[in-house]
Image (cartoon, rainbow, N blue to C red):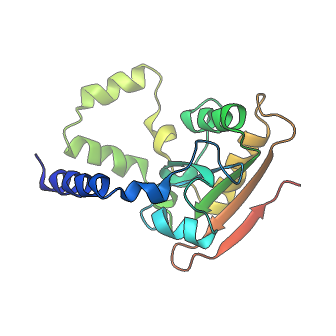
């Protein structure tokens, strides 16, 4: 077994035996009745909750590369709808960040990295022939504000979104934690 996994499991054993989980007990309904979509960037793991005074149990947090919603029926949108219909969320916040890796993804370079890690040309051609456009799937964005606004628009205009759900867009600075408003829903 990988040493990193062994360390994590050893820590977990101590965590459970010491009943450290008790400090995190809550139910599955978000206290702040909010679902947040944000980036998977490691700088945001602790910074974003601290910068917005979010504690365990306060929100549903959905993450992906870039906090991007491109398809109104992707897994992030499904998570938003489940949070609304099953978990009593009443607001949605899309929070992108400055210096996001998705802002400079070059799909040709990305595909080359796939090849270097063993993905064959045949596999890539099969995907292309099946209608999967890797450029479209992995393209980044020019500005984080535009990306957040686009994701907000997809959520706001979703045919299954109830009228009373407010959808907001923000950008956080991963260096300072400063949050700027892109768009507020009143």
| Outermost residue to the bottom | 176
27 is higher (above) or lower (below) than 149: above
| Picture quarter with the C terminus | bottom right
Residue visible at 37% across and 59% down? 20
Q: Quadrant of residue 183?
A: bottom right
Horizontally, is 162 left or right of 10 in the view?
right
36 is higher (above) or lower (below) than 119: below
Q: Position of residue 54 (x, y in %)?
A: 61, 63
Q: Quadrant of residue 155?
A: top right
Horizontally, is 61 left or right of 23 in the view?
right
Horizontally, is 154 left or right of 40 in the view?
right
| Outermost residue to the top | 130
41 vs 25, nearest the viewer? 25
Residue visible at 58% across and 41% down? 28
Does residue 98 show up? no
Residue visible at 25% across and 31% down? 121
Horizontally, is 77 left or right of 107 in the view?
right
66 vs 186, nearest the viewer? 186
68 vs 95, nearest the viewer? 95
Q: Position of residue 185 (x, y in %)?
A: 84, 54
Q: Position of residue 60 (x, y in %)?
A: 60, 47
| Picture quarter with the N terminus | top left
129 is higher (above) or lower (below) than 174: above
Q: Position of residue 51 (x, y in %)?
A: 60, 72
């Amino acid at each position: 077994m990988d040493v990193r996994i062994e360390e994590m499991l050893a820590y977990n054993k101590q965590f459970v035996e010491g009943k450290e989980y008790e400090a995190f007990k809550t139910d599955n309904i978000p206290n702040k009745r909010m679902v947040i979509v944000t980036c998977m960037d490691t700088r945001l793991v602790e910074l974003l909750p601290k910068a917005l005074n979010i504690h365990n149990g306060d929100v549903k947090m959905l993450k992906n590369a870039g906090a991007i919603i491109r398809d109104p029926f992707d897994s992030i949108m499904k998570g938003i709808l489940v949070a609304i219909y099953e978990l009593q969320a009443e607001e949605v916040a899309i929070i992108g960040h400055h210096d996001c890796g998705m802002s400079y993804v070059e799909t040709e370079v990305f595909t080359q990295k796939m090849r270097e890690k063993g993905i064959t040309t045949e596999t890539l051609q099969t995907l292309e022939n099946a209608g999967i456009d890797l450029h479209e799937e992995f393209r980044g964005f020019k500005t984080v504000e535009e990306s957040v606004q686009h994701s907000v628009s997809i959520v706001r205009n979703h045919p299954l979104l109830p009228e009373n759900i407010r959808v907001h867009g923000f950008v956080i600075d991963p260096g300072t934690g400063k949050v700027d408003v892109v768009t507020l829903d009143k």
